[in-house]
């Protein structure tokens, strides 16, 4: 029913049902513009934020053809949108998050329109039409800005969740239009549109299958005007639709196998859940424990809806303590009573409080698949609330509006409430979104809130590793290793040991790395990761032949990222012994498998720099920096390239300063900075950085050789000759280098 202005209130009018009065259109346009501005303001500080957790899985899909051939049907719609973002700019999270925010804004408008439409349906119009606009605006505002939805918007890969919700809402709206005008010329196309939307939702994320019971729920509350018989007929059609959807989607999505696996778990409620595609890493609880735990999880979700303070929001709650019985932990029984109490309230108050009852049942039905059916999945993820809260917010707000009656019908009062909610919820969302600033910030926040979270410890270690803070990375990998050992979590023990061993090798701490290798051989015999560490260790120890043999052996069993790492280590080993062509081949094999692996591009740049192909050295080093802008080795190499090209020393200094900013454990950044300072005439500063280079591994003849090179580039042949004579007098200098120096002196 349309609205017209009447003494500052929103009052019902009775024009043609298809008419859209100018006043109503202006209200909708104003609301849409306001909501768009509010959403973009609340999420603006997340746009350039870090990648997180499963965001890295996006890079596994390098082409549309690969998607179609290798993962036909598996969340295909979502991955095709990721492919679109990769086409724009694969390494920049800005365009991915901008797309996510746009989807969230579309969903906000769908919540707005569904709320408005519901209160104008034939069976609702006489009593509730005048509340349509206030309820729609308030419902959309809360949905748009509530912090509980952050992880479905700012967490890039959870576009799957928001896309799935979008198609569910579109399918429901199409169904509502069809049911409210069953004799119209567009009824069949709209039914088909509804079905297509549900399928698109399922191919974005499987939980869109819950659209079918949600549509039945909506029908029962708001469309069942012709009585029980008509509803039962449509219910039968809905059940048949569920069966058809599962049957059609079973081939590409494996629904039938998954359904069989889950049904089998429900038949063995007290046996540990076997690992499957949807289960958590190292799942160790039983189906009954999973179900009991989810009552506590839902209660925590509901508390976040009421008190969504940033300090209470958790990005990743791995390690949520499972309920082993109704009294352990003690909060289990109260949580069960709360959820069952809400169900009873919704059923008993269906006639007197229809909107609240609908909202409660919508929430519990929408969240049930991921919480109570997908046994063995992680207990807690806040993004699972995205579709459930769409109906819950509408139900609570509509019931509140009906209870208050007059106040929200006054335009000034309505907009005052909207602005207050926007400032409050939008401010909390904006504040929380600072957590996306960088990976260290995100995972430090998570570890502080969930200290037992092994996954967060590993992710924080990875964040420090990318920032070249090897000390901090090693500390968190060590904590994860100790925790995984004491808690008997084999998968995390494997990952933590492997990562800690890699850090020790990056730092050049060979004895510590050897201890990790021995530990892994004792507990993880036959693992490819152990072989990779051994090959890396042998390479750094100077035994290139044994290293190549070990790495080639590991290559036969390595998969995924491990295979990329092996090729890169083979390239590094070949580069160290002067086999440039073979090194380049191995690096190329690495980037063919993973075009986003920066270390392989750095290695190729290093090889080309060594053989004085400066153009290619610059090309591949630039590619490495494009993927990993803060890598100290790539920055130092770019500084050297600028100097060799006789580019501006100022530019070289900028690269060198960035390379030493994180105090990396490698000598190359300090040597590059020293060379820059030599060219700038700051010999004292250069000596200080040469000393740091020596402390970080620039030993023996290499140190005076680096100094000779720097002064030769400056044009000071006297000092260059002085340092070259020092090189010739050192026992570790290669004989051919000594001979070349003596010949040049003659």
Image (tube, helix red, strand yellow):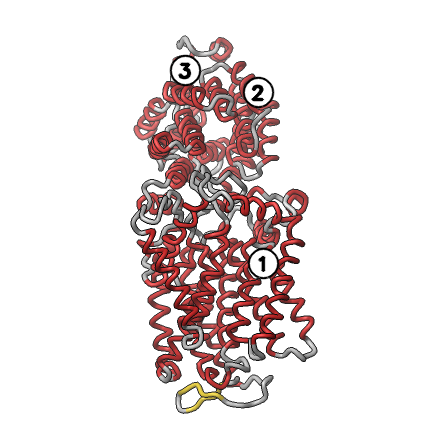
At numbered mark 2, what does the secondary structure look like: helix, strand or loop?
helix
Q: Is residue 234 left or right of residue 511?
A: right
Mark in the foreground, 3 or 2: 2
Report the residue at 34% width, 31% height from top. Answer: 486
Q: Estimate the spatial distance between the alpha carbons at disc 3 and disc 2, rounded to whole Å.
A: 34 Å
At numbered mark 1, what does the secondary structure look like: helix, strand or loop?
helix
Q: Estimate the spatial distance between the alpha carbons at disc 3 and disc 1, rounded to whole Å.
A: 64 Å
| Label 3 sits on residue | 701
Number of other residues with Cα within 10 Å of mark 3, as a class: few under 14, some 14 to 19, many 20 or more: some
Is residue 419 at all visible to an observer of this figure?
yes
Residue 348 in percent (x, y) is at 41, 71
Number of other residues with Cα within 10 Å of mark 2, as a class: few under 14, some 14 to 19, many 20 or more: some
**Along the viewing direction, whichever of 622 and 641 lies nearer the viewer:** 622
At numbered mark 3, what does the secondary structure look like: helix, strand or loop?
loop
| Label 1 sits on residue | 201
Mark in the foreground, 1 or 2: 1
Sequence-first disc among 3 and 1: 1
| Label 2 sits on residue | 553
Sequence-first disc among 1 and 2: 1
Report the residue at 32% width, 46% height from top. Answer: 328
* Quadrant in the picture for residue 454: top left
* Residue 415 vertical position relative to residue 650 in the rendered view, above or below: below
* Residue 228 vertical position relative to residue 202 in the rendered view, above or below: below
């Amino acid at each position: 029913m349309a609205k017209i202005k009447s003494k500052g209130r929103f009052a019902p009018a009775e024009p043609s049902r298809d008419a859209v009065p100018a006043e109503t259109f202006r209200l909708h346009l104003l609301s849409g513009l306001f909501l768009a501005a509010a959403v973009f303001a609340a999420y603006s500080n997340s746009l350039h934020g870090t990648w997180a957790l499963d965001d890295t899985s996006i890079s596994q899909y390098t082409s549309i053809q690969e998607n179609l051939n290798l993962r036909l049907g598996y969340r295909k719609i979502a991955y095709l949108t990721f492919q679109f973002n990769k086409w724009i700019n694969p390494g920049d999270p800005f365009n991915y998050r901008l797309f996510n925010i746009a989807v969230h804004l579309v969903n906000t408008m769908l919540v707005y329109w569904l709320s408005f439409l519901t209160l104008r349906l034939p069976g609702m119009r006489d009593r509730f039409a005048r509340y349509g606009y206030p309820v729609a605006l308030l419902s959309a505002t809360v949905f748009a800005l509530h912090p509980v939805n952050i992880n479905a918007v700012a967490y890039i890969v959870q576009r799957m969740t928001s896309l799935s919700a979008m198609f569910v809402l579109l399918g429901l709206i199409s169904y509502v239009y069809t049911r409210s005008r069953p004799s119209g010329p567009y009824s069949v196309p709209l039914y088909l549109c509804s079905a297509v939307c549900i399928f698109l939702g399922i191919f974005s994320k499987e939980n869109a299958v819950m659209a079918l019971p949600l549509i039945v729920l909506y029908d029962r509350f708001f469309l069942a005007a012709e009585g029980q018989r008509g509803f039962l007929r449509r219910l039968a059609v809905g059940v048949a639709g569920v069966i058809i959807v599962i049957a059609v989607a079973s081939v590409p999505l494996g629904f039938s196998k998954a359904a069989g696996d889950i049904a089998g778990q429900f038949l063995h409620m007290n046996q540990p859940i076997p690992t499957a595609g949807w289960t958590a890493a190292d799942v160790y609880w039983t189906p009954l424990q999973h179900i009991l735990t989810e009552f506590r999880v839902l209660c925590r979700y509901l508390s976040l809806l009421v008190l969504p303070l940033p300090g209470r929001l958790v990005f990743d709650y791995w390690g949520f303590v499972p309920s082993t019985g109704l009294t352990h932990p003690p909060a289990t029984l109260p949580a069960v009573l709360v959820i069952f109490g809400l169900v009873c309230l919704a059923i008993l108050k269906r006639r007197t409080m229809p909107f609240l009852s609908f909202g409660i049942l919508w929430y519990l039905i929408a969240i049930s698949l991921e919480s109570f059916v997908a046994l063995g999945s992680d207990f807690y993820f806040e993004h699972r609330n995205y579709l459930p809260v769409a109906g819950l917010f509408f139900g609570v707000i509509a019931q509140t509006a009906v209870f208050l009656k007059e106040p929200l019908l006054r335009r000034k009062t309505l907009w005052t409430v909207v602005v207050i909610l926007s400032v409050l919820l939008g401010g909390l969302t904006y504040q929380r979104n600072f957590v996306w600033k960088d990976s260290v910030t995100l995972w430090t926040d998570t570890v502080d809130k969930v200290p037992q979270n092994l996954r967060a410890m590993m992710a924080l270690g990875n964040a420090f590793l990318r920032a070249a803070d090897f000390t901090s990375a090693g500390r968190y990998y060590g904590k994860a290793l100790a925790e995984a050992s004491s808690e008997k979590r084999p998968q995390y023990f494997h990952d933590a040991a492997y990562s800690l061993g890699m850090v020790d090798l990056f730092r050049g701490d060979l004895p510590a790395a050897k201890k990790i290798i021995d530990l892994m051989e004792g507990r993880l015999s036959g693992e490819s990761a152990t072989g990779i560490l051994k090959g890396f260790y042998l390479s750094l120890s100077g035994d290139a032949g044994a290293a190549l043999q070990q790495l080639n052996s590991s290559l036969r069993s390595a998969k995924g990222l491990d295979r990329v790492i092996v090729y890169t280590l083979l390239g590094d080993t070949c580069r160290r012994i002067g086999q440039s062509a073979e090194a380049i081949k191995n690096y190329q094999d690495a980037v063919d498998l993973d075009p986003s692996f920066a270390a392989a591009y750095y290695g190729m740049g290093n090889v080309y720099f060594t053989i004085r192909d400066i153009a290619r050295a610059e090309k591949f080093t630039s590619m490495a920096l494009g993927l990993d802008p803060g890598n100290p080795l790539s920055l130092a190499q770019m500084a050297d390239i600028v100097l060799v090209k006789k580019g501006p020393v100022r530019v070289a200094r900028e690269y060198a300063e960035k390379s030493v900013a994180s105090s990396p454990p490698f000598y190359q950044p300090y040597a590059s900075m020293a060379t820059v300072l030599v060219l700038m005439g700051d010999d004292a500063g250069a000596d200080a950085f040469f000393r740091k280079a020596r402390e970080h591994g620039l030993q023996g003849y290499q140190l005076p050789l680096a100094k000779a090179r720097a002064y030769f580039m400056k044009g000071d042949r006297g000092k260059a000759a002085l340092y070259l004579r020092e090189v010739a007098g050192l026992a570790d200098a290669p004989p051919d280098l000594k001979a070349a120096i003596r010949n040049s002196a003659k």
